């Protein structure tokens, strides 16, 4: 039990190895700008450098977005992210591979199987979370198509326990970011260590907190909070549209699950329409706290509704979607 608690705060972590081909790198900085964990340093005109911070040897969650956005194919990522033991032990198989829907013994090149896939499968495999947006906002008609895709998602008892809030007012989006960062900044400052050492009081605090709220103290979201803070608190990447997805707390069975299914419909529809999207949940916990009661009232969040997640939406700046490798969860066949 003691070892279990010791590995709750800043657990031992294995990181993938990121490489950059200096001969083909265009020095555009897109990997730096789009990395969700702030895992690169970059100066305009220079080659980005993979980094870690605050006790993280590397700031990389193995999402491969840097590969997807690189215009010259200069980025490389090998290996995987894993936590070998403790509270946040990884249970993935550590098989990082491109799509293999037909179960071939050796993972094929995607180009060899693309023709055999349905349009929906191609969209699922190629969609990437977008963090580089143009200023131009999609029209109300296009946004409505995305909301309709969410409305037609399956839900328990067909109760559709959602409330969509579409925010295009940049001042309101900025206020949501600023107020949320007040809480998120405190959390990540408590967690991170300037010299990379585990301080006893932090170990105790995070260990106890993780026991009470296991989903909130995984180390990976901490890096996203740090990146947002460095980016002047910009959580939504300057997206022209933010859609909040609220759940009806009285919804049948599991309204959180229903909201998740709904959001998946929405982002797939968005990418099929040529838009980019990113599901963003960092502000949701602060939004539920008393400190943001005034903001909730301002934008009209009323009981029994509560924010579950949100979507940053807009036109992607350059190519974002693409095929990447992903780790593999265990599968059990009972036949």
Image (spheres, rainbow, N blue to C red):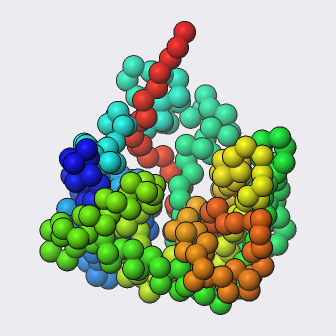
> In the displayed structure, would residue 160 be above or below residue 233?
above
Residue plotted at (36% across, 73% down):
188
- The percent position of residue 94, horizontal first and vertical second, equals 32, 36
Residue closest to the far bottom: 171
111 sits left or right of 26 in the view? right
Q: How many tags in the picture? A: 0
Q: Quadrant of the N terminus?
A: top left
Q: Nearer the viewer, residue 212 or 29?
A: 212
For this view, does 122 lie left or right of residue 184? Answer: right
Above-or-below relation of 57 to 159: below
- The one of 72 and 293 positioned closer to us in this rendering: 293
The answer to whether any part of residue 245 appears in the image is: yes
Residue 226 in the figure: left or right of residue 264? left
- 124, 293: nearer the viewer: 293
Q: Is residue 34 above or below residue 321?
A: below
Spot occupied by residue 19 in the image (x, y as percentages of width and height) = 24, 57
Q: Residue at x 15, y 68 (%)?
A: 197
Q: Is 328 left, or right, of 194 in this rendering? A: right
- Of residues 116 and 62, which is closer to you in this image? 62
Hey, which residue is sitting farthest top in the picture? 335
Name the quarter where the C terminus is drawn. top right
Going 43% across and 57% down the picture, which residue do you hit?
A: 212
Q: Position of residue 14 (x, y in %)?
A: 23, 49
Indicate the position of residue 61 as horizontal and vertical percent values. Answer: 35, 55
**Residue 21 in view here:** no
Q: In the figure, residue 243 lies in which quadrant?
A: bottom right
Q: Residue visible at 82% across and 51% down?
A: 160
């Amino acid at each position: 039990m003691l070892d279990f608690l010791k590995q709750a705060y800043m657990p031992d972590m294995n990181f993938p190895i990121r490489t950059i081909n200096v001969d083909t790198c265009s020095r555009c900085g897109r990997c730096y700008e789009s990395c969700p964990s702030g895992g690169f340093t970059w100066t305009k005109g220079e080659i980005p450098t993979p980094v870690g911070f605050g006790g993280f040897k590397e700031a990389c969650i193995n999402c491969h977005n840097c590969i997807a956005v690189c215009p010259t194919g200069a980025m490389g990522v090998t290996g995987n992210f894993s936590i070998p033991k403790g509270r946040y032990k990884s249970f993935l198989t550590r098989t990082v591979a491109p799509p293999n829907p037909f179960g071939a013994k050796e993972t094929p090149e995607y180009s060899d199987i693309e023709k055999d896939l349905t349009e929906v499968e191609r969209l699922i495999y190629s969609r990437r979370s977008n963090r580089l947006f143009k200023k131009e906002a999609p029209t109300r008609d296009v946004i409505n198509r995305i909301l309709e895709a969410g409305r037609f998602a399956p839900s328990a008892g067909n109760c559709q326990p959602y409330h969509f809030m579409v925010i295009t007012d940049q001042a309101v989006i900025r206020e949501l970011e600023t107020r949320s960062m007040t809480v998120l900044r405190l959390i990540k400052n408590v967690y991170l260590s300037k010299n990379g050492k585990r301080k006893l009081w932090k170990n105790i605090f995070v260990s106890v907190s993780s026991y009470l709220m296991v989903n909130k103290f995984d180390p990976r979201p901490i890096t996203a909070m740090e990146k947002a803070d460095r980016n002047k608190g910009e959580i939504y990447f300057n997206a022209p549209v933010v859609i909040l997805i609220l759940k009806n707390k009285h919804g049948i069975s599991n309204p959180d699950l229903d909201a998740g299914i709904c959001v998946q419909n929405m982002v797939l529809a968005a990418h099929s329409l040529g838009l980019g999207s990113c599901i963003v949940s960092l502000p949701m916990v602060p939004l539920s706290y008393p400190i943001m009661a005034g903001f909730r009232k301002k934008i009209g969040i009323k009981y029994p509704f509560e924010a579950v997640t949100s979507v940053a939406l807009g036109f992607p700046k350059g190519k974002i979607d693409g095929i990447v490798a992903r780790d593999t969860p265990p599968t059990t066949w009972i036949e």
